[in-house]
Amino acid sequence: MVAALRTSSPSIIIGKTKRMSLDRFRQWQPRDGWKYDWNDGETLKYKKMVSEKQRFIVQNLLDTFYALGLNKIGGLLPEAEMSYGNNRYRVPDVAFYTREQTKAAASGEHTIAKFIIEILSDYDYNLNIENKLWEYFENGVEVVWHIMPSHKLVKVYTSPRKVSILMEEEICSAKPALTDFEITVNQIFELKD
């Protein structure tokens, strides 16, 4: 069992918190502002959910997604549940699911998003981020974006070993998972009126 990791701020603890069943976890509604994942009975205090200061990033992503008409083939869903069989359960910041996947999930089938976006903060712990990245790809995810607001950059992964680090007017692409979804880094971080 991995002990909780205490960061430089004494009030922030990231790591395993308590054991519970998956059914209980899915009904649990933590009110502390932290995001939790479930891994084989352990709840993981992973990071704060998308903060108020980061909401505009999600809005920019959704605006572009809808402007491109991609909602006809699926949804770019914030904080959507994703499980790998019966032992791991994750809640990515944003994930793309096709309409077929959404329909299958409504019937109780486990579906894996092919494209995931995580908005990273200064509170995220590198080892947890890396472990989660490998886990995503091992389970069928094709593209992961790590958006880093503190540096105004995006890391686009098409495998755990292949990454493009993008800034400013460089284009972030969700290929091959979502071929037509592209946005510049500046568009992601643009504060609109």
Image (tube, rainbow, N blue to C red):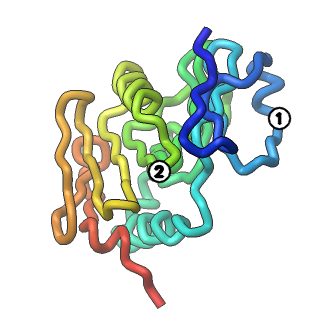
Q: In the figure, residue 143 lies in which quadrant?
A: top left
In the image shown, does 9 or 170 lie closer to the viewer? 9
Task: Describe the element under mark 1 as helix, strand or loop.
Answer: loop
Q: Which class describes the residues within 10 Å of circle 1: few (<14), some (14-19), or many (20+)?
A: few
The quadrant the N terminus occupies is top right
On the question of residue 92 being in view, the answer is yes
Disc 2 crowd rating (10 Å Cα; few below 14, some 14-19, many 20+) is few
Looking at the image, which residue is at 64% across and 13% down?
40
SS at mark 2 in the image: loop
Q: Nearer the viewer, residue 159 or 45?
A: 45
- Tag 1: amino acid: Trp
Badge 1 or badge 2: first in the primary sequence = 1
| Residue identifier under label 2 | 122
CB atoms at circles 1 and 2 under 8 Å apart? no
Residue beneath disc 1? 28
Residue 190, above or below 76: below
Spot the residue most to the top. 1
**Residue at image location 27% in from the left, 48% down from the top:** 155
Decide if residue 86 is in sight here. no
Amino acid type at image mark 2 = Asp
**Which residue is pictured at 72% across the width and 50% down the height?**
33
Task: Answer with left or right where residue 49 lies relative to residue 113.
Answer: right
Which residue is at 79% across, 18% downward? 20
Q: Residue furthest bottom?
A: 193
